[in-house]
Image: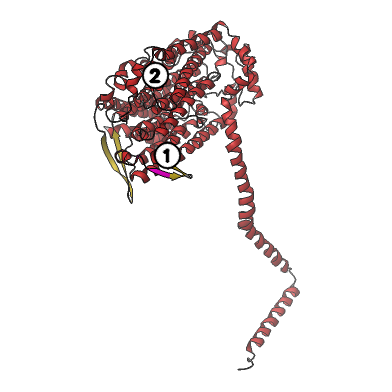
Amino acid sequence: MYHAIVFFPLMGALIAGLFGRRLGPKMCEAITTGFLAFSALLSWGVFLDIPGTDHATRVQVANWFTAGDLVVDWAFRIDTLTAVMLVVVTSVSTLVHLYSIGYMEEDPHRPRFFAYLSLFTFAMLMLVTSDNLVQMFFGWEGVGLASYLLIGFWYEKPSANAAAMKAFIVNRVGDFGFSLGIFLVFVLTGSVAFDGIFARAAEIKDATFHFLGYDWSVWTLACLLLFMGAMGKSAQFLLHTWLPDAMEGPTPVSALIHAATMVTAGVFMVARLSPVFELAPNALVVVTVIGGITAFFAATVGLVQNDIKRVIAYSTCSQLGYMFVALGVGAYSAGVFHLFTHAFFKALLFLGAGSVIHAMHHEQDMRNMGNLRRYIPFTTAMMTIGTLALIGFPFTSGYYSKDAIIEAAYASTRPGHTLAFLATVVAALFTSFYSWRLFFLTFEGPARWAHHGAAPTDAHHAVAHAANEADGAPGHHEGVAHDDHGHDVEPASHSAIEHHDHAHTPHESPLVMTIPLGILAFGALFAGLIFKNRFIGEGMDRFWGHSLGHGPDNHIMHDIHHVPALVSYAPFIMMVAGFVLAFWMYIRRPELPGQLAAQQPSLYRFLLNKWYFDELYDRIFVRPAKDFGKFLWKEGDGRIIDGMGPNGIAARVLDVTRGVVRLQTGYVYHYAFVMLVGVAGLISWYMLAGLPKVGH
């Protein structure tokens, strides 16, 4: 059964990728979606059966390789954490496959798209079922490759190619630290298998390692290196810049990356290695602080974004910060619970945004929307449910998991917990504000889509437009990409799609796209209520068994029940405040945002340009790297290597041949003279060589 769960998506990817042209798009869609659906059904069976076991089940597939003392098997580790991730990955991926049948209907390269989707799912399944760090790294790099292929799926668009390269390169930075962490763990324990690592971890918890002139705790250094990989893959502060640009891919790809695969890999890795992280409290402080900063930073940027997908993308970045805060303070079950619930409402929001884009004929700028609830009522209802779950409205999925994280941050006694608590509370306010801002701009107010291309309709739009023009933003709006919505077009015709007339009537999406929305909405509403007792309630210990590493002094999940009432109500207060503020600014006083932006232009630009991290990295890393590469190209390769090597030798040969060519005059007497000189020279040599040597 476990083999089928993992390898069915791979079979779908191979069939669609190798035989897609022969089978046709419809057959490829049916095969890949059917395989994923079967894998999801089996995953739910595992989820309902496996939790509560004391020991992980190990399923051997094959011996991968053996090199000296390093033995790496290809095996599946099946425990509660694995079961949770199997359900998340396969369920969301199945719904994304089904949704894509309608969304990508007009794309001529659907077999390739569905092959990439299934390959993405297979790589993530390899990651979450891994029994050792090398197999995890294989899946880790596999999701990186698949994300590159999917983000750059419309490769005719330069912006899509740039976004794919950016995601790939930024993730390599984190993966460098991850690989060093794996090397160090092997040096310390002599094993890369999780059972072997956990068995020896406590024995060497007090050992030190000399690195960069300092004596480090071995597990602190190892966990920091491993967490560096998680920062890249899960888009944490400083390594987050690839995530919003990933919106250049088709919307179903965004849903899959942000809800079930790729960005959740870092959270899963820290949770899987929680027994080791428990031995490195200083590393957990870094995890907590980075998570808190990410939650706050991404929420501030989401306040002013205009692309509907980018707002949701920064929401993902912020929610991942929440998850790492939970992991950092030791509330591992709360962090994984938020990963579980977040998958439902974030996939719902992204696919709902895709339904909006479908209705708006590829438009993604919320400033060109409005009053859509009259035309796409079902999508509006689904987006409402996703918004309520995201902001933590009582009794929705986000309410149970996010509130538990905020309470855990307050109840913790570890350094950095106060910063994390304040950051997550403020982020809850910002999350509510930008979520309702998205909703009001998209579904309420006047219909601005009938006047696309005209001047901005209010002061806020005018300030934003002026700021975008001043910043020299790509396209016609800063931070706004236009989803081709299944049109694989050349760049010339793509510009026509970007600026086409939107004087049309928005329409509801087809049934194949709305069914996944309904299923995800059910999860967004009830997944928290149904599973809270298992994940973080009274049945928590039995449910998780030994799959998460709570140390003997870690009582954080019990301490959250004793926090002050004000702390428990803080998320709800922030949620209400964000709603009231957004309602006042975008429904009652729509001119107010423009006035505030005009009064604080520097702050507005700072947030609109995402704290200028892209510009900063361009100045510090990209330009020097390009200049250094150009120097090596022109001077090192061109002047030294080619100049003194192939080109230099070739030039000398040409010089010699030019001199020899001059001897070929075409006059017979010149040749006769040269022959006489040659004969005279030979006679002279023989005469001199034949003379007797004096003295013998």
- Residue, disc 2: 407
> Residue 572 lies in what quarter of the image?
top left
Q: Who's the residue at 47% across and 20% down the image?
A: 422
Residue at the farthest top position: 588
Left or right side of 159 for 406: left
Which circle's residue, 1 or 2, is located before the other in the chain? 1
Secondary structure type for disc 1: helix
Q: Is mark 2 on a helix, strand or loop?
A: helix
Q: What kind of secondary structure does the magenta stretch mostly adopt? A: loop
Query: Residue 67 placed where, x, y %?
Result: 34, 50
* Relative vertical location of residue 442 with respect to residue 331 in this rendering, above or below: above
Q: Is residue 386 magenta?
A: no
Residue 539 percent location from the top left of the image: 27, 21
Rendered view: 627 above or below 94: below
Quick check: marks 1 and 2 in contact, CB under 8 Å?
A: no
User: Which of the labelled discs sits on residue 221, or is there none?
Assistant: 1
Q: Residue at x 59, y 19 (%)?
A: 500
